[in-house]
Amino acid sequence: MAELAHRQQPTGPIVWVLSKGADHEGGDVLGVYASKEVAKGPFAEAARAIPFDLDAAWQDEESGAVHAHGGCDWVSLEPHPLIIAPQLT
């Protein structure tokens, strides 16, 4: 049942989380945005700040998340549901 709930599309508000990091070392949140459009500029700036040549950039067809990778560094902009009420466990 939990697996089915995980697959359902969120019906509430969505926020876009911009993060950066290094492979196998985790990452940091750079910002949380109300829309993908608002986050485009900060995403592009963060991708340009990768100190290596970009070796991959892609968009997830299903979620719309975008990613850039260069050397061992990465930047991601991913949608996440905004939790506005207590969650049942």
Image (cartoon, rainbow, N blue to C red):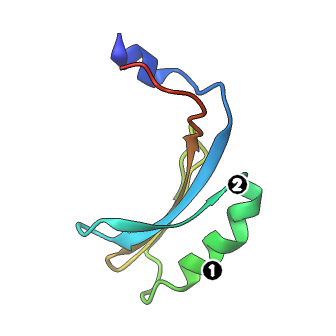
Q: Residue at x 56, y 35 (%)?
A: 83
Q: Is residue 22 left or right of residue 12?
A: left
**Residue 47 picture location, percent across and down:** 55, 77
Q: Is residue 13 left or right of residue 77?
A: right
Relative to the observer, which residue lies in front, 3 or 81? 81
Classify mark 2: helix, strand or loop. helix
Q: Which mark is residue 88?
A: none
- Quick one: quadrant of the C terminus? top left
- Quick one: quadrant of the N terminus? top left
Kindly indicate the quadrant of the structure image that contains residue 27. bottom left
Residues at marks 2 and 1, CA–CA distance in whole angstroms: 14 Å
Q: Residue at x 54, y 47 (%)?
A: 60
Check disc 2 and report the residue beneath it. Answer: 36
Kindly indicate the quadrant of the structure image that contains residue 40. bottom right
Residue 67 in sight: no
Q: Is residue 31 left or right of residue 24?
A: right
Check disc 1 and report the residue beneath it. Answer: 45
Relative to the observer, which residue lies in front, 58 or 3? 3
